[in-house]
Image (spheres, rainbow, N blue to C red):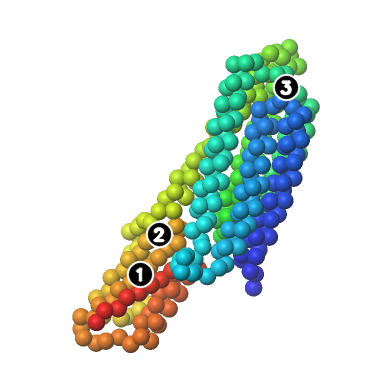
């Protein structure tokens, strides 16, 4: 049987290796050219490298059982990590927009197309590989960490294609005697590129903010779970049973309370069996979900 967490970390390390390679590649070319786009790319890989190390650590935390300080386990660290990651991407994009606007008003330097084509071509190949591979693995493992990672690689791949198109347009302008306009392509595209890069991170930022709060589960999901519990555990129909289902930092927490109104006390073995049955139903949804119960005579 495949160890899901171990396989997840293996792929996170592979992703981090490619991030480090692209980070070095970007920092080198950032020194070779004055391109706003290359600077934005290099900055994003530096941040991705730092976050990648933290991601591997968080992946290890998921294996730990619950404790007194973390009774629901350590799954809640995942939305925290994704929140930080998406926030940093947003901040990088805001910085790039500001620098690009400044470059437009001050007058951008002439584009160095040979260097730019080499940089974006190699980057596109590496991004495409990681995007396709990690997307397949994330679906196979149903890993939220790998899904976020795959999303970033997919965004980078689409961005690289757009960047190459922008450089080609700039090169065409220069070749046809419009060198002044050619220089403005880089900062203008960088602005639109930065805005585009913010779309998914902003959405994911909001989603993870919601996950970090304690919230009720939608009525349809609640009703489906309760119906499954009652169908699998007959005593729920005989006694007054109340269910509480909440979302705590991405972990589904179910609590059921049984009140004896028919004066037929339940044994502890019956209660444990009922809890085990309910936990089995919840495990079909996700193994990290938690269950608690209370019985009053």
Which residue does the image show at 35% across and 79% down from the upper left? 233
Which residue does the image show at 49% across and 69% down from the upper left? 66
Assess whether mark 1 and mark 2 are in contact (beta carbons under 8 angstroms): no
Q: Earlier in the sequence, mark 2 or mark 1?
A: 2
Assess whether mark 3 and mark 1 are in contact (beta carbons under 8 angstroms): no
**Which residue carries the number 3 mark?**
111
Q: Position of residue 84 (x, y in %)?
A: 53, 47
Q: Say which quadrant the N terminus sits in.
A: bottom right
Compare residues 133 and 148 and report the one nearer the observer: 148
* Mark 3 secondary-structure assignment: loop
Q: Which mark is residue 226?
A: none
**Which residue carries the number 1 mark?**
255
Q: Quadrant of residue 106?
A: top right
Q: Quadrant of residue 6?
A: bottom right
**Which residue carries the number 2 mark?**
247
Q: Earlier in the sequence, mark 2 or mark 3?
A: 3
Left or right of 50 in this view: 239:
left
Q: Position of residue 248 (x, y in %)?
A: 41, 59
C-alpha separation, residue under disc 1 versus residue under disc 3: 63 Å
Left or right of 20 in this view: 87:
left
Neighbourhood count class around disc 3 (C-alpha, 10 Å): few under 14, some 14–19, many 20 upward: many
């Amino acid at each position: 049987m495949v160890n899901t967490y171990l396989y997840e970390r293996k792929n996170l390390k592979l992703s981090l290796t490619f991030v480090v390679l692209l980070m070095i590649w970007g920092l080198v070319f950032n020194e070779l050219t004055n391109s706003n786009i290359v600077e934005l790319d290099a900055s994003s890989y530096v941040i991705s490298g730092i976050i990648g190390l933290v991601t591997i650590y968080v992946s290890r935390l998921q294996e730990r059982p619950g404790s007194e300080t973390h009774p629901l386990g350590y799954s809640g660290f995942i939305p925290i990590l994704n929140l930080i990651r998406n926030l940093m991407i947003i901040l990088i994009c805001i910085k790039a927009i500001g620098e690009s606007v400044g470059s437009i008003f001050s007058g951008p330097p002439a584009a160095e197309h040979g260097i730019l084509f080499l940089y974006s071509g190699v980057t596109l190949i590496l991004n495409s590989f990681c995007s396709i591979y990690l997307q397949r693995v994330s679906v196979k493992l149903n890993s939220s960490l790998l899904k976020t990672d795959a999303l970033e690689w997919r965004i980078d791949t689409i961005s690289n294609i757009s960047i190459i198109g922008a450089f080609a347009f700039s090169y065409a302008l220069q070749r046809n005697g419009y060198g002044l306009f050619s220089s403005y392509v880089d900062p203008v595209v960088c602005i639109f590129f930065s805005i585009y890069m913010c779309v998914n991170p902003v959405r994911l930022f909001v989603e993870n903010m919601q996950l970090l709060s304690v919230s009720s589960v939608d009525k349809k999901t609640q009703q489906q779970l309760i119906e499954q519990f009652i169908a699998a555990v007959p005593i729920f129909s005989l006694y007054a049973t109340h269910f509480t289902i909440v979302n705590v930092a991405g972990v589904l927490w179910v609590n059921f309370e049984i009140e004896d109104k028919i004066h037929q006390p339940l044994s502890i073995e019956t209660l444990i069996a009922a809890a085990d049955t309910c936990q089995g139903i919840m495990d079909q949804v996700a193994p990290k979900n938690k269950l608690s119960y209370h019985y009053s005579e």
